[in-house]
Amino acid sequence: MESLKADLSASVTEFKRSPTRLIEQAGGRPLAVLVNNRPAFYALSAETFERIADLLDDLELAETAQQRLAEGDFVETDLGEL
């Protein structure tokens, strides 16, 4: 059996009938949409998706910063010159 990455689920048939209502009822939590009792996709509110996208952007920036720190290729500067 596949594990769900969400506490809430609905059949694809139920989702097709009223997707907006189900997403509103989820209250920002992910909703697993099932086909034959298996997750086909996860539905999220726009706000939740945007939060996740921001976190992924932050993670990518942190990885870039860590790589640059590890390379040690620094340019010395004076804040007064900026």
Image: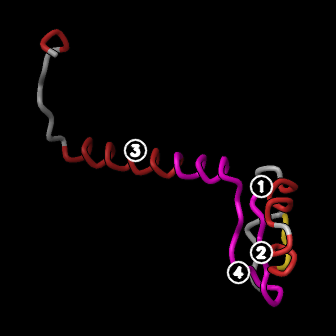
Q: Quadrant of the N terminus?
A: bottom right
The CA span between labels 2 and 4 is 6 Å
Q: Find numbered disc 2 in the image and state the secondary structure of the residue it sits on.
A: strand
**Residue at the location (40% across, 51% down)?**
60
Residue 81's disc is none
Q: Which residues are magenta?
A: 29-54
- Expressed as whole percent of the image width and height from the top left, the position of residue 51 reads 60, 46
- Expressed as whole percent of the image width and height from the top left, the position of residue 42 reads 70, 69
**Numbered disc in front, either 2 or 3:** 2
The residue identified by callout 2 is 33
Marks 2/4 in contact by CB < 8 Å: the verdict is yes
Q: Is residue 17 left or right of residue 65?
A: right
Please say if 2 is above or below 21. Answer: below
**Numbered disc in front, either 4 or 3:** 4
**Is residue 34 on the magenta stretch?**
yes
Q: Earlier in the sequence, mark 1 or mark 3?
A: 1
Residue in front for this viewpoint, 81 or 34: 34
Residue 29's disc is 1
The CA span between labels 1 and 3 is 26 Å
**Numbered disc in front, either 1 or 3:** 1
Marks 4/3 in contact by CB < 8 Å: the verdict is no
Q: Earlier in the sequence, mark 4 or mark 3?
A: 4
Q: Quadrant of the C terminus?
A: top left
The residue identified by callout 3 is 62
The residue identified by callout 4 is 40
Q: Is residue 79 left or right of residue 58?
A: left
Marks 2/3 in contact by CB < 8 Å: the verdict is no
Q: Find numbered disc 4 in the image and state the secondary structure of the residue it sits on.
A: strand
